[in-house]
Image (tube, helix red, strand yellow):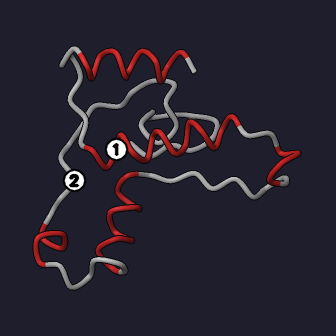
Amino acid sequence: MNAWLNVSKAYNESTVDLPATAILVAQHNMVTETISDTFIGDGRKKFFCPADVLAGVKAGLLSLNAQVTAFTLPTYAPVAGVPGLASSHASISCV
């Protein structure tokens, strides 16, 4: 959880630049990581990568929206300890 607090603070202070897609995916992954297997069952946790979420949105829900389909995810630096943003993480590695 400290990793998320650190990146939130850095984002607020404009010392780290993250696209909204990456922030939303990281928030989802951080919350998912904290939920006990007792509540959602072993192996049912779904972690995502920002690029995969964007590809899914482009292929599905907003596939007819030209602005969305033309959008490309900006390059961003890995954020250590944040699943979906870390270059290496126990839950998921995406960057």
Residues 28 and 52: in front is 28
Q: Quadrant of residue 55?
A: bottom left
Q: Residues within 10 Å of mark 2 (few under 14, many from 20)?
A: some
Q: Kindly identify which residue carries mark 1.
A: 22
Q: How far across and down, in percent of the image, does residue 75 sit?
A: 20, 43
For the residues bearing labels 1 and 2, Cβ distance under 8 angstroms: yes
Q: Left of 79 or right of it: where is 13?
A: left
Q: Position of residue 46 (x, y in %)?
A: 63, 56
Quadrant housing residue 8: top left
The quadrant of the rendering that contains the N terminus is top right
Q: Could you say which is closer to the camera, residue 84 or residue 6?
A: 6
User: Compared to 3, does 85 lie above or below?
Assistant: below
Residue drawn at x 22%, y 53% as measured from the top left: 73
Q: State which tag comes first along the sequence, 1 or 2.
A: 1
The amino acid type of the residue labelled 2 equals Leu
70 vs 27: above or below: below
Q: CA distance from mark 1 to mark 2?
A: 9 Å
Q: Position of residue 59 (x, y in %)?
A: 33, 80
Where residue 62 appears, x then y in whole percent? Answer: 28, 77
Q: Check the picture and name the quadrant holding the C terminus.
A: top left
Position of residue 75 relative to residue 9, above or below, is below
Q: Is residue 16 left or right of residue 41?
A: left
Local secondary structure at mark 1: helix
The residue located at (73%, 40%) in the rendering is 35
- Tag 1: amino acid: Ala
Graded by Cα atoms within 10 Å as few (under 14), some (14 to 19) or many (20 or more), the crowding at tag 1 reads: many
* Tag of residue 34: none
View extreme (right): residue = 38
Residue for badge 2: 73
Identified at 38% across, 52% down, the residue is 50
